[in-house]
């Protein structure tokens, strides 16, 4: 139990929890910006093209129940925009990381494809013998 407590303290104080909290707050703020972009700019334009009403208020009735398809489509566009922007950001970040981490003193193991030192004669991951 003591080891678990020590691990938790290291996690909480070591920066992981703080980084996670900052990422969460930035994510919430980013979602608000994208929501405003969709609600205040995109959907009124689409609503003006589709009908006189704002797009989020578009609905129809089925058996006395109101089906608000405009609101659903607004939320769907929000999600797609956030997913697209996050995809682009993460793809760019991963590309930068690959460029920074390109080690010149390693090679891939031909058997397990893990990264190993150039001078290695045996793979430390799969223990295969490597040719010189």
Image (cartoon, helix red, strand yellow):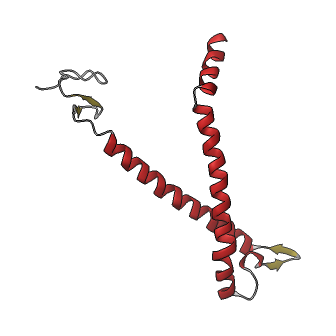
Q: Is residue 117 above or below residue 85?
A: above
Q: Nearer the viewer, residue 16 or 64?
A: 16
Q: Can residue 73 be seen?
A: no
Which residue lies most toward the right here?
64
Q: Is residue 10 above or below residue 59?
A: above
Q: Which residue lies at the image location 89% right of the left edge and 76% below the top edge? A: 64
Q: Which residue lies at the image location 33% right of the left edge and 42% below the top edge? A: 100
| Image x and y of residue 23, in percent | 60, 44
| Image x and y of residue 44, in percent | 69, 80
Q: Is residue 34 above or below residue 48?
A: above
Q: Quadrant of the C terminus?
A: top left
Q: Quadrant of the N terminus?
A: top right
Q: Which residue lies at the image location 28% right of the left edge and 35% below the top edge? A: 113
Q: Can residue 41 be seen?
A: yes
| Image x and y of residue 49, in percent | 65, 87
Q: Quadrant of residue 98?
A: top left
Q: Nearer the viewer, residue 11 or 58?
A: 11
Q: Quadrant of residue 45?
A: bottom right
Q: Which residue lies at the image location 65% right of the left edge and 62% below the top edge? A: 33
């Amino acid at each position: 139990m003591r080891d678990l407590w020590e691990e938790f303290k290291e996690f909480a104080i070591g920066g992981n929890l703080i980084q996670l909290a900052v990422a969460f707050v930035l994510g919430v703020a980013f979602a608000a910006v994208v929501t405003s972009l969709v609600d205040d700019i995109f959907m009124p334009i689409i609503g003006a093209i589709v009908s006189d009403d704002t797009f989020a208020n578009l609905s129809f009735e089925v058996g006395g129940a109101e089906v608000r398809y405009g609101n659903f489509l607004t939320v769907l566009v929000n999600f797609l925009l956030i997913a697209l922007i996050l995809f682009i950001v993460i793809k760019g970040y991963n590309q930068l990381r690959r460029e920074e981490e390109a080690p010149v003193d390693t090679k891939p193991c031909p058997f397990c494809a893990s990264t190993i030192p150039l001078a290695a004669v045996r793979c430390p991951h799969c223990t295969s013998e490597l040719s010189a």
